[in-house]
Amino acid sequence: MLIKKINLGCGDKKNPGFIGVDRIKTAAADIVHDLDIMPYPFDDNSVDEVIADNILEHLTDVIAVMEELRRICKNGAIIKISLPYYKSSGAFSDPTHKHFFTENSFQYFSPDHEYHFYTKAKFKVLKVKLLAKDFGDRRHKLRNLLPFKKFFNFFLFNIYDEIYFELKCIK
């Protein structure tokens, strides 16, 4: 059985073994498709793994995207999502960002969430990870040495730059 993996919004990043999808033709894009336009060019229940690396914050309707991912993903498929963290200056400094994400953003798609009746998308959150990137400048290096980062994160901005989610598709 063929395992199908897709990288949504791949840009110029080629991940070995993944089908790159982007709205512009790049060396990494195997399929050119605007991810704001549904349906995506994949059959129902045909995808085993999805990477969405810094793309969801640019798309118009996150709920529609998640519903489309559920349509194309097999039961148990893994979706790996990286996004700017809502408490980072990077989340707000890019004028193309339309949405902001917290540690709880994808709980909405859990069947036991109080507002889940607004969507057909069903996912189980397997992992949530906050990431502090080292951009090579002194300020970021010092921040990465900060003890009790998770505690200080409640009170301060720019402790973390990115948030990573791993979801499992539920059919």
Image (cartoon, grey):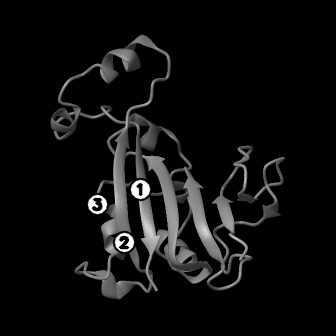
Nearest to N terminus: mark 3 or mark 1: 3
Spatial CA span between label 3 and label 2: 12 Å
Which residue position holds label 1? 165
Residue at image location 17% in from the left, 41% down from the top = 154
**Label disc, if present, on residue 21 of the rendered structure:** none
Q: Earlier in the sequence, mark 2 or mark 1?
A: 2
In this rendering, position of residue 141 left or right of residue 22: left
How dense is the environment of label 2, judged by Cα within 10 Å: few (below 14), some, or many (20 and up)?
some
Residue, disc 2: 124
Q: Amino acid at mark 3?
A: Asn
Instruction: Pick whichever of labels 3 and 2 is earlier in the sequence.
Output: 3
Residue at the image position 41 percent from the left and 56 percent from the top: 165
Local crowd at mark 3 within 10 Å, few (<14), some, or many (≥20)? few
Most distant residue in the front direction: 1
Tag 1, which secondary structure?
strand
Name the residue type under label 1: Phe
Left or right: 33, with 81 as reference point = right
Q: The N terminus is located in which quarter?
A: bottom right
Residue 26: % across, % down: 82, 49
Identify the mark at residue 104; answer none if there is no mark: 3
User: Is 106 rendered above or below residue 116?
Assistant: above
154 to the left or right of 46: left
Residue 68 position in % (x across, y down): 57, 78
Identify the residue shown where x is 51% and y is 79%.
Answer: 67
Outermost residue to the top:
138
Residue 61 vs 58, above or below: the answer is: below
Q: Is residue 1 left or right of residue 145?
A: right
